[in-house]
Amino acid sequence: MSLGIRIEFGGGLELLFCNEKKHKITIPVSVPKDNDTKVSSDSSKELKPADVNYLIHHLRDHLLKERVELFMENGTVRPGILVLINDTDWELEGEGDYQLKDNDEIVFISTLHGG
Amino acid sequence: MAPRTCVLCEKAKAILKRPKTGQQICKDCFFYVFETEVHNTITQSKLFSPGDRVAIGASGGKDSTVLAYVLKTLNERYNYGLNLFLLSIDEGITGYRDDSLETVKRNQQQYDMPLKILSYDELYGWTMDAIVSQVGRKNNCTFCGVFRRQALDRGAAQLNVDHIVTGHNADDIAETVLMNIMRGDIARLGRCTSICTQGEDTIKRSKPFKYAYEKEIVMYAYFKKLDYFSTECIYSPDAYRGHARTFLKDLEAARPSAIIDIIHSGEAFEVSEEVKAAQKAQQTCKRCGYMSSNDLCKACTLLEGLERGMATSGITDRARKKMDAEGPAPENLRTIPFFRPPTGQPAVAIEAPS
């Protein structure tokens, strides 16, 4: 069982991801609680429904090409990166604890680039 | 989690949590409050008068793009009676500014505003690419900052505008307050929170986004689908500012009001008369006529150093003395064209939107 998630990067963040703004990825419905994205499915780890915290780790481990410190800090996105879940500020959706659904769209926009 | 309803209209689904107030609001209410707050900033500070010619310092980045869009909207909605122009400075940074200028050219069409681009190359005879190849990446931001400030004033004088507005937002100003405290620059600390600055000879400058949070500017651009450019300058960014910025973003994550709180702190500092008196009186540069606190303005000093192959002479006193010891500037030294403040008629043809 897996979820298809649409990802969009903006505000310069796409430069860390092959300079591609839009991506489509697939993640498992249930994922390890510790957000480890590299374990096999038969591992005995405790599981949770896939959430945005897991998604951020997945993007770091499987999509990010350079300079992880510009994307993540202390287990979440770096301060100054805005996140939208289906075009709504993630602060209204529970931030990293938001449980992903099939075909959700998650947008990451950096505010840190020059204006 | 159930969808939350906008606290303002109590009808539509909330899409944004305002960092300033914590309110949850819908898209239409967000556009309305964001624009209205900028309008209130403009009217309360009496930034404009009907008939003013106003240049928007446009880099193609998020802040100036949103500023151009919002000013155009407010000018029409509230009949400010402004003549708006886009003014861009081409620093001559291949792969950075040339791309962002393409964005500004699209903005010219989208917003139907005349655009003037002034390059470092035509004004100073040096592009930033050439400067960096001579001075390296360590002090190049000094050259760029000094040259840009003067270029904006000169571009504005050529457009014969009364006023330059820039996209500096609340986060930028809070960052500058922090930097001035960390550097002990009390005189600048006293000035950096002013919404409007005006030297005697220079053109008025102001920051209509002084109280606008970066988060809301970016969200506004996102929801309005505005066309902006975002890439870091390819030359070493200002490292000190970078640290202040990271610190500020960490503070904001812990408490969103931190940004406005720091601006208020900056405003509340009273700069003593002694500090103000210690500032040098303004005069005009003997070589180029631009305002200066010395015989030569900073841009002329930097340019002379570049031309004579002693680029650090504009940066440290020691290097300056060394260059002075080598004799006066040669007769045929390249100089900046003489500065003439606005006179009443545009001095140059400007590109009208086609």
Image (cartoon, coloured by chain):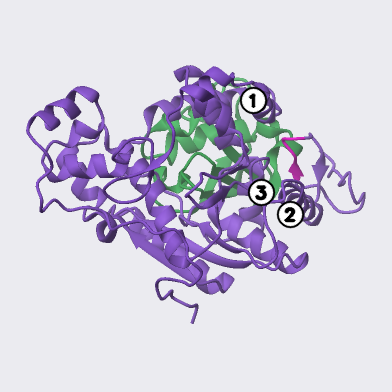
Chain colours: A green, B purple
Q: CA distance from mark 2 to mark 1?
A: 23 Å
- Residue farthest right in this picture: B10
Q: Quadrant of residue B198?
A: top right
Query: Looking at the image, is A110 positioned above or below residue B42?
Result: above
Badge 1 density bin: few <14, some 14–19, many ≥20, Cα 10 Å:
many
- Image coordinates of residue A2 in percent, x first then y, are 60, 44
- Image coordinates of residue B186 in percent, x first then y, are 52, 21
Which residue is more in the foreground, A2 or B337?
B337
Q: Nearer the observer, disc 3 or disc 1? A: 1
In-image side of B44 versus B345 (left or right): right
Q: Amino acid at mark 2?
A: Glu
Which residue is more in the foreground, B320 or A53?
B320
- Residue farthest bottom in this picture: B354
Kindly identify which chain the residue marked by label 3 belongs to.
A
In-image side of A6 versus B264 (left or right): left
Look at mark 1 in the image and give the residue it sits on: B262
* Residue that appears at 47% across and 49% down: B201
Q: Amino acid at mark 3?
A: Asp
Q: Is residue B78 visible?
A: yes
Magenta range is: B16-20
Same chain shared by disc 2 and disc 1? yes
Query: Looking at the image, is B331 positioned above or below residue B210?
Result: below
Tell me the element at label 1. Answer: helix
Q: Nearer the observer, disc 2 or disc 3? A: 2
Look at mark 2 in the image and give the residue it sits on: B35
Which residue is more in the foreground, A84 or A1?
A84
Of the numbered discs 2 and 1, the one sitting upstream in the chain is: 2
Badge 3 density bin: few <14, some 14–19, many ≥20, Cα 10 Å:
few
Q: CA distance from mark 3 to mark 1?
A: 42 Å
Look at mark 3 in the image and give the residue it sits on: A102
